[in-house]
Amino acid sequence: MTVGSAASTERVVLKGGTIVDSQGERRGEVAIERGVIVEVGERIAGGTTIDATDCVVAPGFVDLHAHLREPGKEEAETIETGSRAGAMGGYTALVAMPNTDPAQDSVAVIDFVREQGRRAGILEVVPSGCITLGRKGEALAPMAELATAGVRIFTDDGNGVQDDLLMRRAMEYAKGLDITLAQHCEVASLTKGAVMNECPCCTTLGLPGWPSIAEELMVYRDIELCRLTGARVHFLHLSTARSVELVRAAKRDGLPVTAEVTPHHLSLDDSRLSTFDTVFKVNPPLRSHADIAALRAGVLDGTIDALATDHAPHPRRDKELALDQAPPGMVGLETALGVTLGVLNIDLEHLVRIMSIHPARIAGISDRHGRDVEVGAPANLVVFDPAASWTVSPDSLVSKSRNTPFVGMSLRGKVRHTLYNGTATVLEGVAQR
């Protein structure tokens, strides 16, 4: 079947699967017409059949943290290639990070990113806005203007907002605008020249250490600013045990904070840098076994709201630089499901919450993504086999870049189909355009 034959104007029926959403698990078939779910039940007749045997049918995944690189860094990724990688990973929406060139601090750039996503037509590209102009941390971006243009989440990702007063003012504006600020938690003065997690092996390897406190100080500051202003704050890619505990305590106090963690921080520890392989260099860095255990516990007990990829493509030549010069980051859209299922003993309903329902709510797009599989909901769906094993190879990826540490590893959990507004963007594990 091609995209054209599974277009939203035709009736399509998903057969043989188990539906998983906020209502729990249940057997059922799903009929789709004109991009909308029109029937959920047993033995639905008519339409083109998409086989979901032995698979989960769930609301499509939503990634709160994807670097699509366009405009300005198209050698690494474009909105179209990143969207295709997202669809292969089961995503129907990606929040595009604003560290582009130019940065997403104006309506013109936001409109460009959104329109490029529409042209690709593979999933919804949701532009985030900058908190500060040019992400320089010196003056606030025109948040009111960007919010009027539909931006619901703002971040200087790649940089933490260092100025305490500026961040307070950003939160005060955000509260009035009913938007969410997403913070990259890093006190820059503590991480100058740092390459890997600060640990005893730094001395042995001769690598500058990145202390956990650099993240935790900013998490603490922004929790207290949240307490002061009442603004919604989302913490990006948390990586330390203390950060998890700070968020847990803030939630006990009823503060409007949310947090995400990446699959690589759940699965890879700081010893990987002993090989000096730049594919393991990320920001924040891979941490200790104790940190990983705390992150996993935080996901399972609900302290961590969302799984986010921090998909960060880089050209091969950049990742072949020396470890202290190579840029941080790895691609992750296509491996997120398999890595997560391989390291977490998580029930499927909770998996759908952290990969779809909660991210959609945090991004402000829960009217069209992360919806229950029910009549009247937009047909933004993923069909995945939670038991399927597959081995990652460079040829198996459709992202424009290949900087992943999971090449050669066997993962459990594979996307079989992805449907965006009723159109199949992935069928039988194959991208449809």
Image (tube, rainbow, N blue to C red):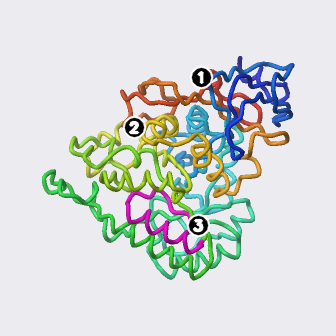
Could you tell me the amino acid type at mark 2? Answer: Asn
The residue pinned by badge 3 equals 181
- What count of labels does the image hold? 3
| Magenta-colored stretch includes residue 276 | no
Lower sequence index among marks 1 and 2: 2
Could you tell me the amino acid type at mark 1? Answer: Val
Q: What element carries label 3?
A: strand
Q: Quadrant of residue 36?
A: top right
In the picture, which quadrant includes the C terminus? top right
* Residue displayed at 86% across by 19% down: 46
- Looking at the image, residue 60 sits to the left or right of residue 325; the answer is right
- Spatial CA span between label 1 and label 2: 21 Å
Please provide percent x and percent y for residue 367. Answer: 77, 51
Could you tell me the amino acid type at mark 3? Answer: Leu
- Looking at the image, residue 424 sits to the left or right of residue 228; the answer is right
Lower sequence index among marks 1 and 3: 3
**Which residues are drawn in magenta?**
233-255
**Eyeballing the image, is 73 above or below 154?**
above
Q: Which residue lies furthest to the left in this view?
A: 204
Q: Nearer the viewer, mark 3 or mark 2?
A: 3
Label 2 environment density (alpha carbons within 10 Å; few <14, some 14–19, many ≥20): many
Q: What element carries label 2?
A: loop
**Which is more toward the observer, 303 or 429?**
303
Badge number at residue 411: none
- Spatial CA span between label 1 and label 3: 36 Å
The residue pinned by badge 2 equals 403
* Residue displayed at 56% across by 40% down: 78
Q: In which quarter of the image is residue 313?
A: top left
